[in-house]
Image (cartoon, grey):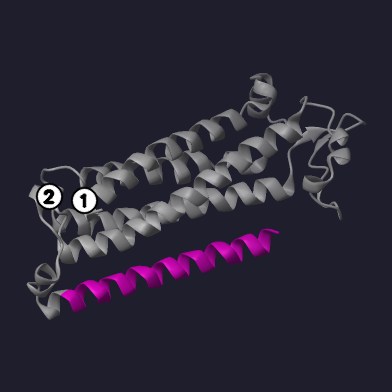
Amino acid sequence: MCTGKCSQFIGISLYPLALLSIICNIFLFFPDFQTIYSKEETEGLYRLTDEVKYMGGVVGGGIMVLIPAIHIHSTGRQGCCANRCGMFLSIIFAAVGVVGALYSGTIAVVGLIRGPVCSVEDGTWSRPFLNSTTSYLGDSDLWDICKEPENIVEFNIGLFSALLVAACLELLLCIFQVLNGLFGCICGTCSHKEVCTLHTKMSISKGQINYLLHLLLIILQYLVILIYGFSTVSFTIF
């Protein structure tokens, strides 16, 4: 598969994942699919899970992936973006998508581990699983601690899990696009039946290849720093 077609496939695949992230994040604002809890939250009452307000699905897995997906998709079409310059830009956009996916995935993991905000037996609203020595994720008997909203534990686990899966897939696709974009810069997008052959590679100067490899190294270094930063923050939170 040539780099242009590959970019088109990646872009199309990112669209539903970004949409899924946005929808899941929005649904999390309405526990038990009711608006009363969001309304009470705006009145100063503690009703919504903190991680929901960080907008990981809307901003990270949604907007920060959707915008790169549009450009990545366009590099697979015949037009102004289906060239080496477009492929170069797709590397940068894909790197932005990586950051967004990492943000969304990190928020989802934290939300899963800390558990939902709910009303316990005495009527107080808190996060009963936050300081628990036993993980509630593997023990469904503990879920009965939450009395309101109804089925809030299953609600949070389902939506945060969907966010996490979407973020992981987005992360893999965006990383692959970084590599695909580099290859597209060297060989072209195979538009107009252009085939990436050894002769095509040799037609590009050694200096250009070294420049692109150096650029990729810088991008990878920044990605490593970002991943380390997210891991550090996650470890501190946990």
Residue closer to the observer: 61 or 121: 61
Q: Is residue 147 magenta?
A: no
Residue 89 versus residue 34 in the image, above or below: below
State the image coordinates of residue 121 (x, y, percent, origin top left).
91, 31
Residue at 15% x, 59% y: name it.
188
SS state under label 2: helix
Quadrant assignment, res 133: bottom right
State the image coordinates of residue 52 (x, y, percent, origin top left).
60, 39
**Residue 152 horizontal side relative to residue 175, left or right:** right
The reply to whether the C-beta atoms of the residues labelled 1 and 2 are less than 8 Å apart is: yes
**Residue 164 horizontal side relative to residue 181, left or right:** right
What amino acid type should be assigned to the residue bearing mark 1? Gly
Residue 135 versus residue 153 in the image, above or below: below
List the residue tagged with mark 2.
191
Q: How crowded is mark 1: few (under 14 residues within 10 Å), some or many (20 or more)?
A: many
State the image coordinates of residue 87 (x, y, percent, origin top left).
21, 56
Q: Give the range drawn in magenta.
A: 209-238
**Mark number for residue 4?**
1
Specify the principal SS of the magenta part.
Answer: helix
Residue at 69% x, 46% y: name it.
112
Residue 184 versus residue 201 in the image, above or below: above
Residue at 34% x, 47% y: name it.
10
Q: Can residue 143 be seen in this view?
A: yes
